[in-house]
Amino acid sequence: MVEAFNLPLGEARPTQLYISARKLADLEALYPPGSEARMEPVPVARLKGAVAFTDGHTRAFLAWKRGLDSVPAYWDDSDLDVPVYLSCLGWCEDEGIRTIADLAGRVVDEDAYKAKWIARCEAIDGAKKEG
């Protein structure tokens, strides 16, 4: 069992440029208003001296959308591919995405999510395998 803590949403940096509208709708159905305390904690890690989400962006975004100031989180001690996460963090910095709230205009349908985000991530992975 991971040890969860309360993470203020403004203190964690996203490593993702888009939110899937389908995933968001699924989470909204799974966690009706008032049930956010039951949400699974989101994983975070220290990257470039900052706390960053390593997953759970949609859960964190849902918490923000509902006006919450924080989200349950835990320190991600998995074997992270740090160079990939640093690339993603750099993309977010380049596009002005510094908090989960900055993803408000980036909730996209499934086709756009796959084309704009998943394909971009797969390109990094493919480049690493070729290199």
Image (cartoon, rainbow, N blue to C red):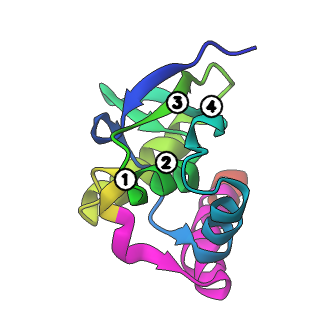
Q: Residues within 10 Å of mark 1 (few under 14, many from 20)?
A: many
Residue kind at label 1, given as amino acid type? Ile
**Could you say which disc has been placed on residue 60 in the image?**
2
Q: Residue at x 53, y 51 (%)?
A: 57
Q: For mark 1, give the secondary structure.
A: helix
Foreground residue, 55 or 34? Answer: 34
| Residue named by callout 4 | 80
Q: In this view, does 39 lie to the left or right of 57?
A: right
Q: Residue at x 58, y 32 (%)?
A: 43
- Label 2, label 1: how many angstroms apart (C-alpha)? 7 Å
Mark 2 vs 1: CB contact within 8 A = yes
Look at the image and tell me in which quarter the N terminus lies.
top right
Q: Which residue is drawn at 35% across and 76% down?
A: 105
Q: How crowded is mark 4: few (under 14 residues within 10 Å), some or many (20 or more)?
A: few
**Could you say which disc has been placed on residue 100 in the image?**
1
Mark 1 against mark 4, which lies toward the viewer? 1
Task: State which tag comes first along the sequence, 3 or 2.
Answer: 2
| Residue named by callout 3 | 72
- Label 2, label 4: how many angstroms apart (C-alpha)? 20 Å
Q: For mark 4, give the secondary structure.
A: loop
User: How many badges with numbers are in the image?
Assistant: 4
Task: State which tag comes first along the sequence, 1 or 3.
Answer: 3
Mark 1 against mark 3, which lies toward the viewer? 3
Mark 4 against mark 3, which lies toward the viewer? 3
- Image: magenta residue range: 103-125
Report x, y in % for residue 17: 44, 64
- Label 1, label 4: how many angstroms apart (C-alpha)? 21 Å
Secondary structure mainly formed by the magenta segment: helix
